[in-house]
């Protein structure tokens, strides 16, 4: 096995999303309740909480879907023509749609990827070994620019006027392969770096800065130990950091890369002279390796040979030409030496070219995979998924908070936050940054939680909580169905 030179660890902020399926959460908590009658009341309360929260969001989600129907890239143009709206009215509706969309993204715990996060993600290579760039001339630059002008956000990425990337959740992707060509490339690159260092040419060449700042663990602990506990650390295992030699060239190697569990990309294509583009694209991806995040970018340019490849070509040609001329000018020119030099140069040319072709094939394969395997949905399907996701998260937050107050008694906001996180860790083995503020607001709105004179939160009894919420429409429909079937 290859031993790593050093560990490369990415420090990330813990997510607020609760990574537990709602049915599993409810049944686990119900089984922790001692009395059977209380258990039945708790299950009834969970259903009523979900029905009520779903009703709260119904109108907002309907407005979101109605607005998107006007900007659906497939059918939106026809509906806009039927509405006979002026360009100014359409502009207002566009901004309304984006406002609703960003609210739903926030409620679903998606975050806008910042410049620093993207720099960290792209500071290494995983399976994609080609530089990918966006053709910005094919993207609209007014839609998002206008939105952020009216709704300022902190730490927006440089490309926020053309497209926006939302991300949520962190995972791990591992790939085991021989990576023969990649290892050969790495060995050549290290030898090339050695030559530059020995000849001191590297001092002349500009160095590419990375957005990744390595931190001293000791200083980190001294500055903010509590913040460090809340962070998530994920290790990268890359060929660049491994001890490579000709011995392990043909042995299998496992590399590892953190992934964004979910990514949503929002953008609009640029308008042409003959057509004003109004369609808004919303694309949803899963399990995207951070270092290969370029595969989700819109309007990608076809990759070509990199400047480094051209430097290699020209450098090899110059070296070969000098070697051949030197050999010819010698008193006794050795044809075998000339042949060997030319063979080496031509072989290096061929190697560089075929490496590019292999990387291009890998790139096309990754793009195909992202379209068929990693793209969850787009457009209306993505929005429907988001709407349901918001409801599921809100319901889970409310149920956990109420359960803690019911079982453990009064608590301050900070205590409740800590107790909820401890429950998730102890009962489900999961960790998250629990959004206690949002949960308490919902409980107060439902009328089943209040505060005492000291500011501590407490809940009403289970039976009283069910009486306060009351019989929901869904329950009446279910009773009616049961009556008909009977």
Image: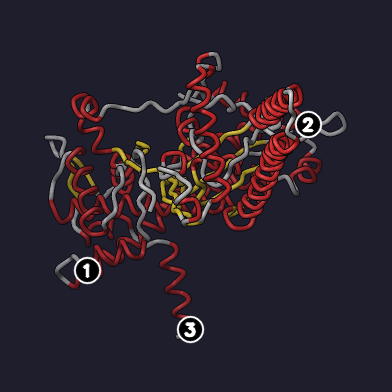
In three-dimensional space, the C-alpha distance between marks 2 and 1, rounded to whole angstroms, equals 58 Å
Task: Identify the mark nearer the N-term, 1 or 3.
Answer: 1
Report x, y in % for residue 275.
84, 34
Of all residues shown, which one is farthest toward the bottom? 486
- Residue 485 is labelled as 3
Q: Are marks 1 and 3 in contact (CB under 8 Å)?
A: no
Q: Secondary structure at mark 3?
A: helix
- Lateral position of residue 57 relative to residue 431, left or right: right
- Which residue lies under the disc numbered 1? 31
The crowding category of the residue bearing disc 3, from other C-alpha atoms within 10 Å (few below 14, some 14 to 19, many at least 20), is few
In three-dimensional space, the C-alpha distance between marks 2 and 3, rounded to whole angstroms, equals 56 Å
Q: Are marks 2 and 3 in contact (CB under 8 Å)?
A: no
Colour convention of the picture? secondary structure
The quadrant of the rendering that contains the C terminus is bottom left
Of all residues shown, which one is farthest toward the front? 331
Report x, y in % for residue 127.
55, 47
Please name whichever residue, 479 or 365, is drawn nearer the observer in this view of the structure: 365
Please name whichever residue, 175 or 260, is drawn nearer the observer in this view of the structure: 175
Task: Identify the mark nearer the N-term, 2 or 3.
Answer: 2
Report x, y in % for residue 380.
63, 51
Residue 136 shows up from this direction: no
Residue 161 shows up from this direction: yes
- Lateral position of residue 142 relative to residue 105, left or right: right
Report which quarter residue 31 is drawn in: bottom left
Q: Is residue 280 above or below residue 431?
A: above
Q: Secondary structure at mark 2?
A: loop
Q: Secondary structure at mark 1?
A: helix
Report x, y in % for residue 298.
66, 39
- Which residue lies under the disc numbered 2? 271
The quadrant of the rendering that contains the N terminus is bottom left
């Amino acid at each position: 096995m290859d031993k790593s030179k050093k560990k490369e660890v990415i420090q990330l902020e813990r997510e607020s999303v609760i990574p537990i399926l709602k049915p599993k959460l409810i049944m686990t908590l119900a089984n922790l309740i001692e009395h059977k009658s209380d258990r039945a009341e708790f299950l009834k309360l969970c259903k009523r909480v979900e029905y009520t929260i779903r009703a709260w969001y119904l109108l907002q989600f309907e407005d979101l879907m109605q607005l998107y129907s006007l900007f659906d890239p497939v059918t939106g143009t026809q509906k806009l023509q039927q509405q006979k709206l002026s360009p100014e009215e359409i502009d207002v509706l566009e901004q309304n749609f984006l406002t609703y969309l960003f609210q739903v993204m926030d409620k679903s715990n998606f975050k806008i990827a910042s410049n620093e996060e993207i720099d960290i993600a792209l500071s290494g290579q995983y399976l994609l070994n080609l530089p990918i760039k966006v053709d910005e001339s094919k993207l609209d630059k007014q839609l998002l620019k206008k939105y952020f002008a009216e709704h300022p956000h902190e730490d927006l990425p440089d490309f926020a006027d053309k497209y926006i990337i939302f991300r949520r959740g962190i995972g791990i992707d591992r790939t085991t392969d021989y990576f023969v060509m990649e290892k050969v490339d790495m060995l050549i690159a290290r030898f090339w770096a050695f030559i530059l260092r020995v000849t001191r040419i590297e001092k002349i060449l500009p160095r590419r800065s990375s957005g990744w700042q390595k931190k001293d663990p000791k200083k980190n602990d001294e500055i903010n130990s509590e913040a460090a506990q809340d962070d998530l650390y994920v290790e990268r295992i890359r060929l660049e950091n491994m001890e490579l030699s000709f011995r392990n060239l043909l042995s299998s190697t496992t590399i590892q890369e953190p992934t964004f569990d979910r990514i949503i990309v929002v953008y609009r294509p640029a308008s042409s002279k003959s057509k004003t583009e109004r369609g808004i694209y919303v694309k949803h991806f899963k399990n995207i390796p951070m270092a290969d995040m370029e595969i989700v970018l819109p309007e990608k340019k076809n990759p070509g040979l990199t400047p480094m490849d051209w430097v290699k070509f020209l450098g090899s040609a110059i070296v070969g030409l000098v070697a051949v001329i030197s050999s010819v000018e010698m008193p006794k020119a050795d044809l075998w030496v000339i042949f060997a030099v030319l063979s080496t140069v031509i072989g290096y040319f061929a190697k560089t070219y075929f490496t590019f072709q292999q990387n291009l094939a890998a790139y096309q394969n990754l793009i195909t995979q992202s379209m068929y395997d990693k793209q969850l949905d787009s457009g209306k399907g993505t929005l429907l998924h988001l709407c349901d996701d918001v409801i599921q998260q809100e319901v889970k937050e409310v149920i956990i908070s109420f359960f803690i107050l019911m079982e453990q008694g009064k608590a301050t906001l900070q205590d409740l936050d800590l107790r909820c996180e401890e429950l998730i860790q102890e009962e489900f083995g999961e960790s998250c940054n629990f959004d206690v503020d949002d949960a308490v607001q919902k409980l107060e709105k439902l009328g089943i939680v209040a505060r005492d004179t000291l500011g501590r939160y407490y809940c009403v009894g289970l039976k009283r909580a069910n009486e306060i919420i009351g019989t929901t429409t869904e329950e009446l429909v279910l009773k009616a169905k049961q009556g008909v079937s009977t």
